[in-house]
Amino acid sequence: MTVARLARCKILPSHLPRMHLPSAHRQMSIAAGLKNSSIFRSQGLIGGKWIGAHDGKTIQVNNPATGEIIADVPFMGRRETNDAISSAYNAFNSWSKQTAAERSKCLRKWYDLIMSHKEELGQLITLEQGKPLKEALGEVSYGASFIEFFAEEAKRVYGDIIPATLADRRLFVLKQPVGVVGAITPWNFPLAMITRKVGPALACGCTVVVKPSELTPLTALAAAELALQAGIPPGVLNVVMGNAPDIGDALLASPQVRKITFTGSTAVGKKLMAGAAGTVKRISLELGGNAPCIVFDDADLDVAVKGALAAKFRNSGQTCVCANRIIVQEGIYEKFAEAFSKAVQNLQVGDGFSEGVVQGPLINEAAVQKVESYIQDAISKGAKVLLGGKRHSLGMTFYEPTVVTDVKSEMLLAREEVFGPVAPLLQFKTEEEAIRIANDTNSGLAAYIFTNNVQRTWRVLEALEYGLVGVNEGIISTEVAPFGGVKQSGLGREGSKYGIDEYLELKYVCLGDMNRK
């Protein structure tokens, strides 16, 4: 079947993704069970104590699949954040002076507890974020892997000896923790984006104030409860949530906070970068992406379809490394579009607790409206919706997995991060053109290429202006490799042996001969 025929038949019911009706009753039952769990918390954590907002204000946490209220959490602001900063600052002296082996044992115990509560944490992620339970359980394992890895790396923070220029001198370099860290995390990976920051920070002796997304704070609070159970001392890990601008301003203004680490939008990242200048804080930023997925004529079609599907539709397209532009060479374009569309047709949409569902809801109404506006922009400029392209019949914030053809670089779908289940297909002729299209963006986080040509692989991966490149693979994140982007996709790296350096300061020491007269 040609792309044109697929386009003509897209409105037929048989060509819509299979649906799975959400079971509100089942979700309410799961929510009730979680509230009785030993890990469920709905207050902030400051100095080892669970507390509410000073003024008693709260904010609702909703299930995006049903709209049901899961819990009310404190709507905290500047005052509570300053209390958390003071708590972290006071705890820093004792925590940083513990031996690496002692900190390692605490982190290892935290990892063990996370894994022993994997099912509950996975359910909590699905409940407040919406991703399918299988995917949520995968996030728990992925998130826990950073705690395990940095529990081991804690014992490998080595200094240096420098050959001296004078006979009576000895020169060496110490690595010391930077101090109190402010960690601001997003809603799309409510556990992993915290552990990827807190793991290395705690491993090297820093203390942390975490500000999770107000959309998904419950997973963060559960993880913090397990940290306390693991023996991580009060004040070492603190969690505040609520008024994002006030919390962010307090973290930026405090001279006691020496490092800001943030995952989120480029626009907010720029504001944090500017705000950090006031007290000259160190800063790590993992910002937005516009990932190209380049499919060459010589690619294995099945491998390319499978890889592109994984890179695009994981978490319903709501990740910063999702393939935002699928750029296909003209010789394989028709075949790829047909095979890819058939694969997308088979994606089951529904609530994350239903068997077989691989696409959950978008996080909120604003996310759906953004997707709709990008689709409308593309259609108005000549693109064709091959599959999907509208809200799902399930209602709420469910959106049909979508394939759009004849996409051009000037369309919003190709210029901006869509953050939804929409796959724009672009066409190219030559390798040079593919590289030019891929690099024609301010972003530079992740890129993907599919080819069986070894020489081409090296040429293209070296030419791509991106921090991460997947070759014939659509899922590339791992705790043992550095994660981060170039250009306006951020600063610094997370994960791997390189990630711990973001939380360390170098101190050079020159030791003279004390017996010299």
Image (cartoon, rainbow, N blue to C red):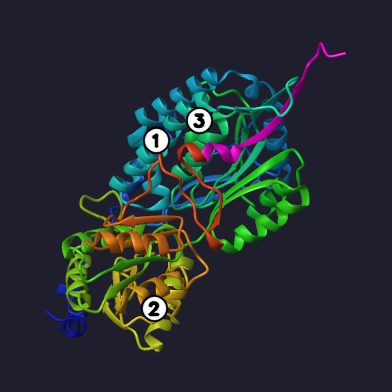
**In terms of depth relative to the viewer, which is nearer, 73 or 419?**
419
Q: Which residues are magenta?
A: 499-517
Circle nearer the N terminus (2, 1): 1
Q: Please indicate, yes or no, whether residue 386 appears anywhere in the rendered image.
A: yes
Residue at image coords 52%, 47%: 493
Image quarter (top left, top right, bottom left or bottom right) of the C terminus? top right
Q: Are marks 3 and 1 in contact (CB under 8 Å)?
A: no
- Location of residue 513 by image quarter: top right
Please provide percent x and percent y for residue 25. Answer: 30, 49
Assign a secondary structure to mark 1.
helix
Amino acid type at circle 3 is Glu
Q: Relative to residue 135, is residue 102 depicted above or below? A: above
Residue, far top: 515
Q: Relative to residue 106, is residue 475 depicted above or below? A: below
Circle nearer the N terminus (3, 1): 1
| Relative to 283, 391 lies left or right | left
How many numbered discs, if any? 3
User: Which numbered circle lies on residue 375?
Assistant: 2
Label 1: which residue? 145
Residue at image coords 30%, 69%: 400
How far apart are the alpha carbons under marks 2 and 1? 37 Å
Circle nearer the N terminus (3, 2): 3
Please provide percent x and percent y for residue 405. Answer: 29, 80
Residue 506 highlighted magenta (yes or no):
yes
Label 3: which residue? 225
Q: Tag 2: Cα neighbours inside 10 Å, few (<14), some, or many (≥20)?
A: many
Amino acid type at circle 2 is Ile
Assign a secondary structure to mark 3.
helix
Foreground mark, 3 or 1, reads 1
- Location of residue 168 by image quarter: top right
